[in-house]
Amino acid sequence: MIPGGVNIGVLRADDGKCVLIDTGLHETSAKKALKAVREELHGEVVAILTTHAHADHFGGNATVVKRTGARVYAPAFDEAVLRYPLLQPALLFAGADPPASMRGSFMLADASPVDEVITGSHLSVNGFEIDVVSLAGHSPNQLGFLVEGVFFCADIVLPKSVLEKYRIPYLFSVRDHLASLDRCSEVECAMAMPGHGPLLESIEPLRDLNRALVNEVATRAIEFAAEWVTAEVLLTRLLRHFGATASDAPSYYLLHPTVFAFLSFLLDEGKLQHDVRDGESLWKVK
Ligand SMILES: [Zn+2]
């Protein structure tokens, strides 16, 4: 593991050929990973497994590929964002052309080639036999990788420090995320490497913390929709309630789709109703 803002996993084969799991945010994190592989492991990177299409996890891919020719493996669906990274800020900005303030490196990564789209539950890469675990929800098709007892579990659980910073964690699908939280603790492993924070001997304490927060946001969303509200009013109420510091476009729009993830989940669950009238899209408890 190369610890950092985003942890990078390294699988080293006896012949020195290495597989990276994620590459960090940008060129600097990629160069740091290449240096660690070459100087500490006396190896060379031949492949990258990308867990999901968030810029902080694949932003270093382009640099690693340019310098090593590594093959890139990425989850189906998410792979589109690796190839067209503008999709990420565009998806956050209601699907439209995002403003300059949302084109920083945290939002807009360098484009990465994708050589293999991961679709099955097993992968053989450079002699490593890898079980692929769906951890969808945090991104449309986030994947975890289980290799020789180590579970690279990406952002299925966020450490306390990250939860305290963002207060409401970004989600694409609440339903998928809850199912993935159940699934992740069924994986038999000796240790887990999350995308952020220290190695985990057991994933369960953080799973419970993350799940409790999702349930708390869902409960508040219902409470704050006692009368008809727009999604934006509901988002403001949630941000204020949870003390989230959304003071610029990236931090606000990161949670814009998240409120819609909760709205569609609660609508499907029969807890909320939706109506469009007089030019407003409105939500209310059922
Ligand atoms: Zn992520």
Image (cartoon, grey):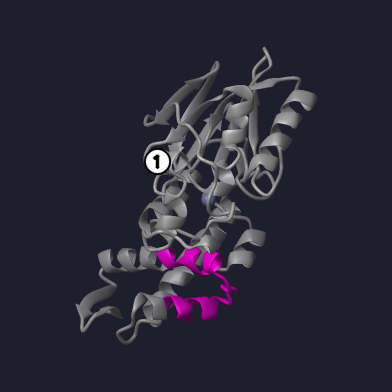
Q: Which residue is mark 1?
A: 80
User: Does residue 138 show up?
Assistant: no
Is label 1 within 8 A of ligand 1 (CB to nearest ligand atom)?
no
Q: Residue at x 40, y 82 (%)?
A: 224
251 in magenta: yes
Q: What is the quadrant of the N terminus in the image?
A: top right
Outermost residue to the right: 39
Dot 1 amino acid type? Ala
* Percent coordinates x, y for residue 108 in the rendering: 53, 51
Outermost residue to the front: 100
* Percent coordinates x, y for residue 20 in the rendering: 61, 30
In the drawing, does residue 220 fall left or right of residue 14? left
Quarter of image, res 15: top right
> Which stretch appears magenta?
234-258
Q: Residues within 10 Å of mark 1 (few under 14, many from 20)?
A: some
Say above or below: 22 vs 169.
above
Q: Residue at x 53, y 32 (%)?
A: 49
Outermost residue to the top: 15
* Nearer to us in this view, 54 or 241: 54
* Percent coordinates x, y for residue 63 in the rendering: 62, 34
* Percent coordinates x, y for residue 283 in the rendering: 29, 78
226 in magenta: no
Q: Residue at x 70, y 41 (%)?
A: 28
Q: What is the quadrant of the C terminus in the image?
A: bottom left
